[in-house]
Image (spheres, rainbow, N blue to C red):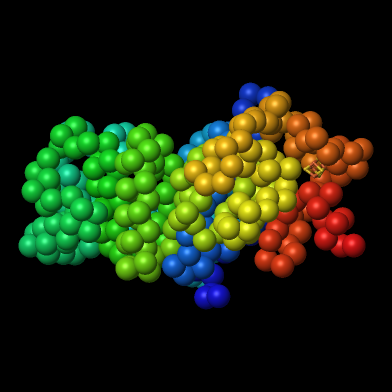
Amino acid sequence: MSQPILQIRDLQVEYATPNGPALAVSDVSLDLHEGEFLAVVGESGCGKSTLLFAIAQLLTYPASVTGGSVVFEGVDLTSLTPEELRQHRWRDISVVMQSAMNALNPTLTIGAQLADACEAHTDWDHERIAERSAEVLSMVSIDPVHLRSYPFQLSGGMRQRAMIAMALLLEPKLVIMDEPTSALDVVAQRLLMRQVETLRRELGFSVLFVTHDMSVVSHFSDRLAVMYAGEVVELGATRAVFDNPQHPYSQGLMEAFPSLLGEVRELTGIPGNPPSLVNPPPGCFFAARCPHATDECRELRPELVTNDEHAVRCHLINKVARV
Ligand code: SF4
């Protein structure tokens, strides 16, 4: 496998709350390789979007990185000044936000917003900006005539594709996507994912993709990181995690969404709620909801242990792996 372009080590993010700091992301370590598509999945509030914002260095108060590092091509982004970070944004790393309607400026045309980004990050003249803007819109199957359109004149799927066009303006090596399909219907979701996949293969950028919807990433990601209560509880090749989820929480997630192939089965949820992140329990964060929890689980926090390129944070699995 290629060298990682992104190395996240022991990353920790806290939110300041009136009751004390809430540990939103806890000891997350991940590598992302050149051209790889890594999906981060988990239920709402598990810390996946906070993790992406921490990687992109876009957190604002009350959230802050309180430990660990985010090294992109040898540079620790957590140590850079805002001006130094600006040099990396768009050129090296770009972000596609959850809701294009909120992320796009409703008072400017798509062309004006593309031009703003170019003017802020390049010394291109008007002709070059117009040429590149038309090019990236065509790349996402939007007729360049829409450079003169305002966001409200585009459909939801087109707006989201326009966001992807903006993210690709300066040919970044890493595109971070925060639930870009969540506001789209199933057909538009599938079209958008196919487009991202085609562009990734053609242009070679890496994708870090956050979603709560397992079915969105099941066919498109190379690897899957499952997050629960701010921790990565399972990490492995997407096919391996789908075919043989090992952490009890991942197993519960798989049971909670329908498969298009195979037998029709009854869907089940995961009873209970995640723990308080202000006063997290001493042992496994999933213990209160886990059907296999033991006294050891309630007292001792499991480590993320890698076995044959598949990492799991569970006493039960790790004991079996050691036998
Ligand atoms: Fe369940 Fe224990 Fe594994 Fe946690 S460590 S997931 S409580 S079996």
Report the residue that reaches farthest toward the bottom.
2
Is the N terminus in the top left, top right, bottom left or bottom right quadrant?
bottom right
Residue 157 image point, x, y percent = 28, 41
Q: Position of residue 174 (x, y in %)?
A: 41, 61
Please report the residue visible at 91 percent of the width from the left and 42 percent of the height from the top: 296
Q: Quadrant of residue 239?
A: bottom right
| Residue 51 visible in this rendered orientation of the protein | no
Residue 245 position, x and y percent, is 68, 50
Instruction: Give the quadrant of the C terminus.
Output: bottom right
Residue nearer the viewer, 148 or 26: 148
Please indicate, yes or no, whether residue 149 appears anywhere in the rendered image.
Answer: yes
Quadrant hosting ligand 1: top right
Q: Residue at x 82, y 45 (%)?
A: 301
In percent of the image, x 12 and y 45: which residue is there? 146
Compared to residue 6, the image places residue 107 above or below, namely above
Residue drawn 37% across the image and 59% down it? 197
Left or right: where 292 falls relative to 261: right
Q: Residue 78: x percent and y percent?
A: 53, 56
- Location of residue 312 by image quarter: bottom right
